[in-house]
Each structure stands twice: as C-alpha cells, then as structure tokens.
Image: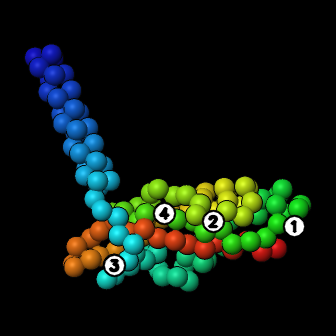
Amino acid sequence: MKKLILMLLMAECCLISAHAQKTVVSQTNQKVFDNVEQMPEYPGGMQSMIEFLQTNMKYPEDAEKQKVEGRVMVQFVVETDGSISDVHVAKQVFPSLDAEAVRVVQAMPKWTPGREKGRVVRVKYLLPIVFRM
C-alpha cells in the first residue's frame, strides 16, 4: 500500500512538472509583438513605474565617482501572464549603470499584459532609464 501511494505521488509530480514545462515552452514559442492594440502597462500606470524606479534604483559607486550620467535603453518582453522576460540592454552607457538598469527592471512586479484582437499576447517593450546625479 505504501509503495502504491508513493508511486501515485511520484506520478502526480511528474505530470505537474510536464504541464509546467509545456506551459513555459508554449509561452516562449508564441510570437512577440512590437506594437499591439493595447500595449502592456505597469500596474498603476506610468507614474507608479517612475516611483518604483526612483525607489529601487541605486546609483553605482564607480559611476558616481567618475560622474557618469546617461540614458540606458532596456528592452524586455512582457509575457502573457504579465511577467518580465528576456531583459537586456539595447543601448549601453556604462557597465555598472547598464547592470543596475537591468537589475531594477527584473525586480519589477507583473504588468498588465498587452492585447491584440482581444487576445493576450507577448509584447516587446523598450524602456529608457535615465541616470542623473
């Protein structure tokens, strides 16, 4: 009886794992749109996103010492569930500023996903992050 219960639990874990992998694969195989009817939105809108960035960004010490400023362009995908993926720097400024911009974008909460023809879709998003002393 114990063996049967153990086997059933193992089978259930395998099924759950397979389903999770299928979901991730199907989500990443979907087309990524550049522009859609309803673009993704940060929860609370643009003002909330600005507040999040101001609260969570830390000016890197080495950039501050060298008085480096600039606008890092960060590109990412807003997934169908609102999560952020494929975060990378599209326009570099300074290594530590670039890394900080990526870090803060990866820390963002889930967004409201984009929609095209009434369907939730993956959308590419380009976000300028300005570092000023």
Q: Which of marks 2 and 1 is in front?
A: 2
Q: What residue type is labelled 2?
A: Lys
> Quick one: 18 or 88, which is closer to the camera?
88
Give me the residue at 74% from left, 60% from top. 94
Q: What residue type is labelled 4?
A: Phe
Across and down, in percent, residue 15 comes to 18, 36
Q: Which amino acid does label 1 sit on?
A: Lys
Q: In which quarter of the image is the N terminus?
A: top left
Give the CA distance from mark 3 to mark 4.
15 Å
The answer to whether residue 14 is visible is: yes
Q: Which SS class for mark 2?
A: strand
* In this rendering, position of residue 127 left or right of residue 2: right
* In this rendering, position of residue 55 left or right of residue 114: right
Dot 3 or dot 2: first in sequence order is 3
Q: What residue type is labelled 3?
A: Val
> Quick one: 67 or 41, which is closer to the camera?
67
Q: In this view, does 47 lie above or below 65?
A: below
Disc 3: which residue: 36
